[in-house]
Image (cartoon, grey):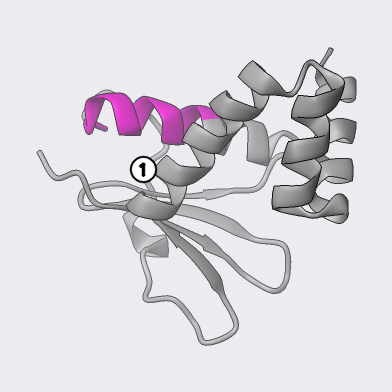
Amino acid sequence: MSKKIEILLDNGGGLQLQTAKFAHSYQSSKAGEQCATDIRDFLKSGDTSDWEGNQPEYRREPALSDDTLDRADLEAIVAAGEAIKRVGKGAMGRELITALLGVEACEAISREFESAN
């Protein structure tokens, strides 16, 4: 069971998850949410054997114009999200997070949390 995972974000809005044995291009209106769920599941188990939607024909090397996220990036993002949830409730926590991440990133995160709740 390989723990390798990579996310490809192309400049046309495409989102693709690739592991050693699974590749999937997310196309739906909730693509980001589904991909995030799949990432969290994979980071916990490292197993895609029971996943549906394998599209090996879409497997590819990243293009120069792609943004890529590897396992370390994804683990850091998930951990940061958990920390933000923990400390972002109070004014000082929000101020600290805003200073660390930058105002634009925090505004985007805030909009996402508001729409989810």
Q: Which secondary structure is most common in the magenta stretch?
A: helix
Figure quadrant of residue 75: top left
**Image position, residue 7 (x, y; %):** 46, 56
**Residue at point 44%, 76% (across, down):** 62
Q: Quadrant of residue 108?
A: top right
Q: In the rendered image of this protein, does residue 13 appear above or below residue 114?
A: below
Quarter in which the C terminus is drawn: top right
Q: Which of 6 and 106 is in front in this view?
A: 106
The residue range painted magenta reads 37-48
In the figure, 9 relative to 87: above or below? below
Seen from the viewer's position, the closer of residues 112 and 37 is 112
Look at label 1 and name its amino acid.
Asn
Residue at 78% x, 49% y is 99
| Location of residue 97 with respect to 27 vertically, above or below | above
Give how far across and how far down residue 92 sits, in percent: 81, 27
Where in the figure is residue 41, as x and y percent of width and height?
A: 38, 25
User: x and y percent of residue 98 in the render?
Assistant: 80, 44
Instruction: Work out whether 62 lies above or below 80.
Output: below
Relative to the observer, which residue lies in front, 12 or 3?
Answer: 3
Mark 1, other Cα within 10 Å: few <14 / some 14–19 / many ≥20:
some
77 left or right of 60? right
Q: Which of the image's four quarters has the N terminus?
A: top left
- The residue pinned by badge 1 equals 54
Q: Does the magenta stretch include residue 44?
A: yes
75 in magenta:
no
Which residue is drawn at the image coordinates 70% and 50% (left, top)? 100
